Amino acid sequence: MTEETPGFEEKPDVPSGATPEDAEPKADSSAAAEESAPAGDANQTAALVAQLDQARKALDERTADLQRLQAEFQNYRRRVERDRIAVKEIAVANLLTELLPVLDDIGRAREHGELVGGFKSVAESLETVAAKMGLQQFGKEGEPFDPTIHEALMHSYAPDVTETTCVAILQPGYRIGERTIRPARVAVAEPQPGAQAVKADDAEAGDDKESGGPDEG
């Protein structure tokens, strides 16, 4: 039975060759590790934020490029559709222009009562097809002369007109929609020179008669 020596405390075992300082807990190294860990996390977070900003910037640029391409494609489609319609209208107009002499012959035959039998059926079918393709005939006697749609081939004066008027349709005009492919060829009449002054004098004389004439002294 061993006796404990009074006044001495038990010390931890120390490996041979180690100094007493090695036996103490390494508190300082643990604290340094804990301090360095938050600093590393902050650097990593900053790097991730920078990468996220770059990704957002790249996304915005790609989105803008896509929107620009979509706008250009829509404009391209509209141009192609507009050109397709224009080409179709030109082709139809050229075809119908070639048929105008035939339609003129049909009109003359109708005026002379020669549109009969099988010829009448064929002629009416041709006119129906032309109308379905958008061909419209215009030009009537008595309408005001319009140089944008009428071509005057004959000119005269008439006392019963108040403006330049189409008095005869020599050849009807044709249009497709708003596009005139042939003006109406017409004979026009203008008011008789001096007719307006005579009419004005007659109107004044009529007014004097209705008012009882000038006062007598």
Image (tube, rainbow, N blue to C red):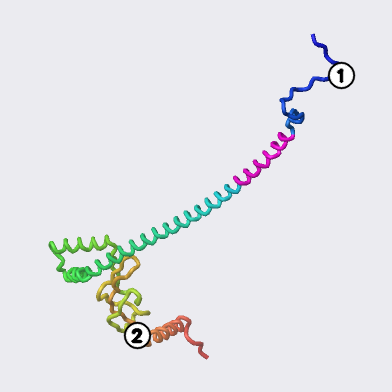
**Region rendered in magenta:** 28-48
Q: Is residue 178 magenta?
A: no
Q: Residue at x 16, y 66 (%)?
A: 115
Q: Quadrant of residue 179?
A: bottom left
Instruction: Report if residue 33 lies within the magenta region.
Output: yes
Q: Name the residue under label 1.
A: 7
Tell me the element at label 2.
loop
Q: In this view, does 108 lie above or below 126?
A: below
Residue that carries the numbered disc 2 in the rendered image: 192
Image spot of residue 100 (x, y percent): 23, 70
123 vs 196: above or below: above
Q: What residue type is labelled 1?
A: Gly
Task: Rate crowding at label 2 as few (under 14), some (14 to 19) or many (20 or more) other CA atoms within 10 Å.
Answer: some
Camera-side residue of 63 and 47 = 47
The one nearer the camera, 50 or 198, is: 50
Q: Is mark 1 on a helix, strand or loop?
A: loop
Q: Residue at x 26, y 62 (%)?
A: 131
In the image, residue 69 lies at what x, y percent? 45, 56
Magenta segment, prevailing SS (helix, strand or loop): helix
